[in-house]
Image: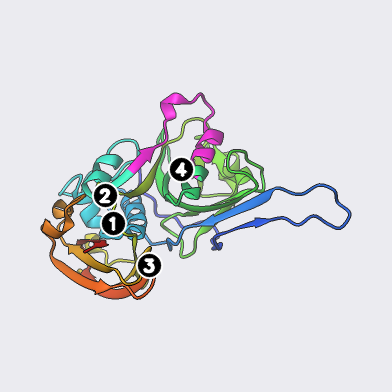
Amino acid sequence: MSHHLNRRALVGGAVVAATTALIPHSGDARVSPARTAIQLPIPPRYQWEERKGYCGESCVQQAALLFGSYVSQHACRALIDPRQRRPFLVAMNDRRVLRQLQLDSAEFPYPDHRTPQFEPYLTWTKQHLGAGHPVLITAYGKYLRDPDYDHIMLATGFDAQQIDRHQDADVLVFNDCFSRDACRRTVASLSDDRRMRGNGREHEFCIPTRVDFGCAITGIIDQSGDARPVRLALDGNREPNIMAGASAEKLDLALTIEDLTPGTRYALYRYDDHRHVPTAGYASSGYDSVDTFVASGSTRETTTTVMSDRIATFRCVPS
């Protein structure tokens, strides 16, 4: 599986999360079914291109922010290979990396499906997106030749008539790790075979028609059941590329904590070592700092900083 991609492509765009019912024209006896549009709040970020490319690591970084963790691309690959030679790969080492980050996941069960797999793969992807789970999807790249896939992207939304059936005009939204904006592609334009002579004539990346690999990140591993959702946001869409000689920098992080009960006291724990992040018993764990507060509403926003080449994980529980 090769990941050395240096090309830029695909027109991007963002959609707003919504579910709307189509209103029939006057005199039309039929009621159109509801159309579903989902967009997870995950802005695109750029991958590094050294060492066969950091597309998988960039996707993990983007998705982990939704679940309260900042993960440098360098730190993500270091979980596989401290020398940075072996990349993050879906269906090979993905779940091992995510478990170390205390993130739960589910892989597309490609051995259970006959070929071609594109339609069940798209259904599986949409089901996870509908549940709020970002999905690492794999694609062929133009001019590349790996038989399985060349590139990893992050699916963040869709606009479709139905989740379990597909129409050519339905849209998948994803971050391709090369574009400033989210990419929007119709189902009719998404897939191709290895030769890339169909949709690949017009598009840089296409989902394989026959055999597909994917990994949905389903949330944090929290055996206590008490952890509240914590979402992180960064200014800008790039991290300093230390693989290209840049120096690590301090980044500003915006934290949003959700599902709080007003009047309840909470503790926000920070872990600067992923090995210290627990799945329960947070108060007695090896956290690096804690911020206690009484919720005045259902959400709380705060800010902090993190070094760009590190990992920082946040958990919020009632105290």
Q: Residue at x 46, y 43 (%)?
A: 139
The image position of residue 27, as x and y in percent, is 89, 54
For disc 2, the neighbor class at 10 Å (few under 14, some 14 to 19, many from 20) is some
Residue 270's quadrant in the figure? bottom left
Q: Which residue is mark 3?
A: 237
Q: Which residue is mark 1?
A: 227
Please state which of the two labelled residues, at mark 1 or mark 3, is closer to the viewer: 1
Q: Upstream in the sequence, badge 2 or badge 4? A: 4
In this picture, residue 247 sits left or right of residue 200: left
Disc sitting over residue 139 in the figure? 4
Q: Are marks 1 and 2 in contact (CB under 8 Å)?
A: yes
Q: Are marks 2 and 4 in contact (CB under 8 Å)?
A: no
Please state which of the two labelled residues, at mark 2 or mark 4, is closer to the viewer: 2
C-alpha separation, residue under disc 4 versus residue under disc 3? 22 Å
Per the image, is 118 magenta?
Answer: yes
Q: Upstream in the sequence, badge 1 or badge 3? A: 1
For disc 3, the neighbor class at 10 Å (few under 14, some 14 to 19, many from 20) is some
Residue 90's quadrant in the figure? top left
> Helix, strand or loop at disc 3?
loop
Q: Which residue is mark 2?
A: 222
